[in-house]
Image: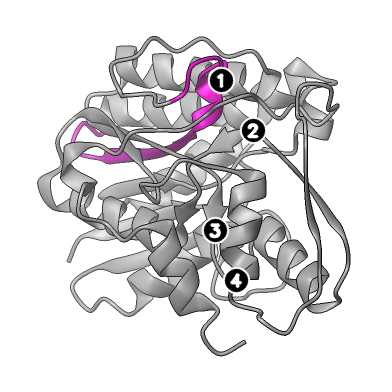
Amino acid sequence: MNKVLIIGASGFLGSYCFNKFSEDNQLEVEGTRNSGLNKNLSKIDYTDSFAFSDFINKSRPNYIVWCAGLKKLSLTEKDLELARKQNFYPIKTIVNYQKDHKDVFLIFISTDYVFNGLKGNYKTLDTVNPSTNYGKSKVLAENYIIEKSPKYSILRAGAIIGPGSVFLNWLVDKIKSNETIELYDNFFTPTPIKNIFKAIKIIINFSKNGIYHVSGKQKLSRYEFGILVKKHFKSSSSELIEVKSSNNDLNLLKDLSLINSKEFEKFESIEKYISKALKHD
């Protein structure tokens, strides 16, 4: 039975993938955590290259899915080396392991921040040009994988949306409380968490080297996303206000929208996903 090792299985995306893979009786799954008390996950510090390498060697996976790393821009944009330590150096450890275990397939979850957000509607063949430390650390990892890894897929996604996602939960709480909400006019392609898991499953099935984009297929501003969510709360008197993102200090880029790879063209739209997710509210 093939084994999937999920690095970062205590995080938002990683825990979702771990739980879904655990329901699949065709695959064995193991997951890691850096903290927390989940006894079903192996505690490991992936920034310790020796301990991390030793752990992977003992795990002996067929597939490694990277769901870990640090995205918090309030931290990464103050410290490029911190971004590298979290998002690049551990990838070198995995790829170096692959040199002696060439049948191991790496699925690296990347980000729309590998682009600078000036034009939007990015395709996989567009040149990466990050303007943030977070994006730069991800590009370092991507380039190292492309150059050195024998078997890999790089899966870039927009902002991940699902039960427990920070932005969606914050928005819903504000709407339910009838608060006035200021939302920026910058564009993105919010990605249902189920779409990412489906993409990972497809990649595992055909195990072909490449770069892929996955999203919720709709380019929206954060303000438009707020409207999409609010319409499911008809009794709410919450007011949404559109504000310019050009002067924000949150590193929100103008347009990070992605075009889905052809393999994922039939995936569910973010509007349909939100409608299902909020139908009981």
| Foreground of the two, 198 or 161 | 161
Q: Which mark is drawn over residue 186?
A: 2
Label 1 crowd (10 A; few <14 / some 14-19 / many >=20): many
Asked whether the residues under the numbered discs 3 and 2 touch, taking CB atoms below 8 Å apart as contact, a structural biologist would say no
Residue that mark 4 sits on: 231
| Foreground of the two, 151 or 49 | 151
Label 3 crowd (10 A; few <14 / some 14-19 / many >=20): many
- Mark 2 or mark 3, which is nearer the start of the sequence? 3
Residue 136 percent location from the top left of the image:
60, 16
Q: Please name the amino acid that badge 1 sits on.
A: Gly
Q: Is residue 94 visible?
A: yes
Mark 2 vs mark 1, foreground winner is 2
Residue 107 lies in the magenta-colored region: yes
Quarter of the image with the N terminus is bottom left
Q: Please name the amino acid that badge 3 sits on.
A: Ile
Locate residue 94 relative to residue 183 in the image: left or right.
left
Label 4 crowd (10 A; few <14 / some 14-19 / many >=20): few
Q: CA distance from mark 4 to mark 1?
A: 28 Å
Residue 123 percent location from the top left of the image:
32, 24
Mark 2 vs mark 4, foreground winner is 4
Residue at x 76% of width, y 22% of height: 246
Residue that mark 1 sits on: 117
Asked whether the residues under the numbered discs 2 and 1 touch, taking CB atoms below 8 Å apart as contact, a structural biologist would say yes
Residue 155 lies in the magenta-colored region: no
Residue that mark 3 sits on: 161
Q: CA distance from mark 3 to mark 4?
A: 17 Å
Q: CA distance from mark 2 to mark 4?
A: 20 Å
Q: What segment is highlighted magenta in the picture? A: 101-120
